[in-house]
Image: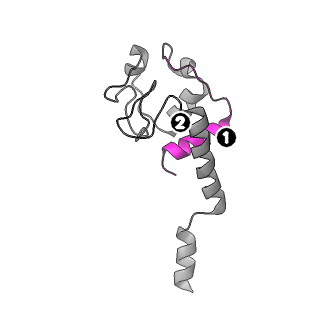
Amino acid sequence: LLLAFAALLGAPSPAAAQDAAGGERAFRTRCGTCHSLEAGQNRAGPSLAGVVGRKAGSVQGARYSKALQESGITWDAQSLDRFLADPRGAVPGTSMTARLTDAAQRAAIIAHLSGR
């Protein structure tokens, strides 16, 4: 019984699994045209593999605006949320123009990027 309970504690909840699937789906539809999740595979935008904890403007071979390279941002949930909500407001001069105004969609994408 104790082992069964421990297994349940470690199992993802149906809501968490649904959130993860929603984040993956939102990433594909909102971000996947310009960004890849494969390391080293840059598109119009840089690969977002391992983006959480990475310094902005640091992916080899990716094209960045000078503004993003000099922003001093290290990506975490808060900085990603702010940037995705309004890229040009967060980093004036960035070349990214796509805004994600839906907070739930941003949260799902950020969770997906974070591996949660």
- Relative to 94, residue 54 above or below: below
Q: Which residue was labeled with disc 2?
A: 78
Quadrant position of residue 48: top left
- Relative to 57, residue 52 above or below: below
Residue 75 is left or right of residue 18, and the answer is left
| Residue drawn where x is 52% and y is 68% of the image | 10
Q: Is residue 100 magenta?
A: yes
Quadrant position of residue 26: top right
Q: Indicate which disc, 2 or 1, sits on the residue closer to the N terminus.
A: 2
Question: What amino acid is at disc 2?
Answer: Gln
Number of marks in picture: 2
Where is residue 43? Give x, y as percent.
43, 28
Q: Residues within 10 Å of mark 1 (few under 14, many from 20)?
A: few
List the single residue furthest toward the bottom. 1
| Residue drawn where x is 66% and y is 58% of the image | 15
Where is residue 46? Give x, y as percent.
42, 29
Q: Which residue was labeled with disc 1?
A: 104
Q: Quadrant of the N terminus?
A: bottom right
Give the CA distance from mark 2 to mark 1: 14 Å
Query: What's the image's color scheme?
Result: one colour
